[in-house]
């Protein structure tokens, strides 16, 4: 039977949490990693109504798209707040796992689902977002010891890129040294200048695993004085936007967005008669990717939470904006998330609802 930890590990093979934005608290937010899991709820956001459903349904854990504990807290006290909701779920023994910007970037995730819902073709990713801090660890070893070094560093947490593990780069070269009196070199001779063939081995690792990786390297290295370098790097960014061919007018695009994502709250900035041959989409709050969308050749961007000034800047740059709301752009991805969790072989309770978050859609004539 799956546990909380094993289920999240299997989910991570599909969502690639290493591609999540640095600020995004994805993964297990609370709960017992060793708890057995049979029933999993999936939701868009852990609001008050969702907590009531969870307490009634009593799943073993919930997978949420939006983090519940988004900002650090030093108190978990009952009440109507994120911390209060966390307290209630913890008290009920319900674990919470989050997949957010990693699911945006993942193949078949939120961004791909939004592009598909709007009928975009020839879709390509854009919009890199930096993940958690990483380091690159470099060392120099005899060729016959390379595999054992890579294995040791990998087991300590290095060399993982997406769904690939034990990743390394190896370069042939020569190292020189003069061993002082009392040294016992593995190759070469003491008291003489030696130039020996070596392999340069490079592996990336989460900065949080740096100490463990270095310890493993030193323990496995054949030299009595292993040489190694550690570099801070930014690499393997997740791409959380998509751009594809649309081939209609901006008015046509607006109509598709209204049909697929809802008309209530829909805003448009741009000439409705202009062509929208290429369209960019970013689920959630994507206004910071306006420049990247234009660089991707888009004529229009569909995203949420675009403020006045960024809309003006987009128009100045030749990019129209279609904003149906933050949660509306994430709705197609919630259907995909439910399907992804169902593929893990557990019973799934779908609590994603209509995906509109805290807002109540209004229709004409609803208010006096």
Image (tube, helix red, strand yellow):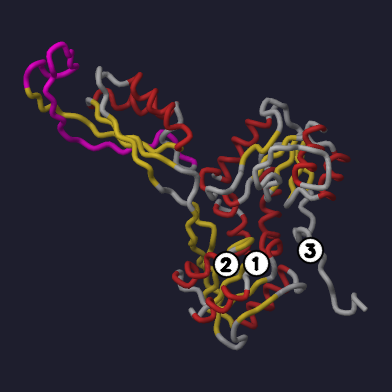
Spatial CA span between label 1 and label 3: 13 Å
Residue 130: x percent and y percent? 48, 51
Judge from the rendering whether residue 276 lies leftward or rightward of residue 341; answer left or right.
left
Total residue callouts: 3
Q: Are marks 1 and 2 in contact (CB under 8 Å)?
A: yes
Q: Which residue is at a point 58% across and 40% down the rendered structure image? A: 12
Please tell me whether residue 167 belongs to the stretch shown in magenta: yes
**Within the image, what quadrant is residue 224 found in?**
top left
Q: Which residue is at a point 73% across and 37% down the rendered structure image? A: 75
Q: Residue furthest top?
A: 182
Judge from the rendering whether residue 270 lies leftward or rightward of residue 158; answer left or right.
right
Q: Main secondary structure of the magenta part?
A: loop
Q: Earlier in the sequence, mark 1 or mark 3?
A: 1
Q: Residue furthest left?
A: 192
Q: Which residues are magenta?
A: 163-192
Q: Which residue is at a point 11% across and 15% down the rendered structure image? A: 190
- Badge 2 crowding class, 10 Å Cα cut-off, few under 14, some 14 to 19, many 20 or more, is many
Residue 181: x percent and y percent? 12, 13
Judge from the rendering whether residue 131 lies leftward or rightward of residue 178; answer left or right.
right
Q: Residue furthest right?
A: 368
Query: Regarding mark 2 in the picture, which secondary structure is present there?
Result: helix
Q: Which mark is residue 305?
A: 1
Residue carrying label 3: 359
Using the image, determine if residue 248 lies above or below residue 356.
Answer: below
Residue carrying label 2: 287
């Amino acid at each position: 039977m799956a546990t909380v930890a094993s289920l999240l590990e299997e989910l991570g093979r599909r969502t690639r949490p290493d591609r999540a934005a640095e600020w995004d608290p994805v993964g297990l937010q609370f709960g017992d990693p060793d708890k057995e899991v049979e029933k999993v709820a999936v939701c868009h956001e852990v609001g008050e109504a969702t907590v009531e459903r969870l307490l009634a349904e009593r799943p073993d854990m919930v997978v949420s798209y939006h983090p519940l504990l988004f900002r650090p807290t030093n108190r978990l006290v009952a009440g109507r707040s994120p911390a209060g909701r966390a307290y209630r779920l913890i008290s009920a023994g319900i674990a919470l796992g989050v997949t957010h910007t990693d699911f945006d970037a993942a193949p078949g995730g939120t961004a791909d689902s939004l592009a598909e819902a709007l009928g975009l073709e020839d879709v390509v990713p854009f919009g890199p977002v930096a993940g958690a801090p990483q380091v690159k660890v470099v060392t120099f070893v005899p060729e016959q010891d390379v595999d054992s070094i890579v294995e040791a560093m990998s087991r300590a947490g290095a060399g993982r890129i997406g769904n690939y593990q034990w990743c390394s780069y190896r370069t042939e070269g020569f190292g020189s040294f003069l061993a002082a009196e009392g040294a016992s070199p593995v190759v070469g001779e003491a008291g003489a200048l030696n130039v020996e063939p070596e392999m340069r081995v490079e592996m990336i690792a989460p900065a949080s695993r740096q100490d463990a990786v270095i310890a493993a390297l030193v323990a496995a290295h054949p030299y009595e004085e292993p040489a190694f370098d550690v570099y801070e790097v930014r690499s393997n960014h997740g791409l959380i936007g998509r751009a594809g061919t649309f081939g209609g007018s901006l008015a046509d695009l607006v109509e598709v967005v209204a049909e697929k994502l809802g008309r209530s709250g829909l805003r448009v900035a741009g000439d409705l008669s202009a062509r929208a041959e290429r369209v960019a989409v970013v689920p959630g709050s994507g206004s910071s990717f306006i420049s990247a969308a234009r660089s991707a050749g888009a004529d229009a961007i569909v995203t949420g939470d675009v403020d006045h000034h960024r809309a003006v800047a987009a128009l100045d740059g030749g990019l129209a904006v279609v904003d149906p709301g933050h949660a509306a752009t994430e709705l197609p991805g919630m259907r995909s998330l439910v399907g992804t969790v169902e593929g893990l072989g557990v019973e799934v309770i779908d609590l994603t609802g209509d995906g509109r978050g805290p807002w109540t859609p209004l229709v004409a004539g609803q208010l006096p």
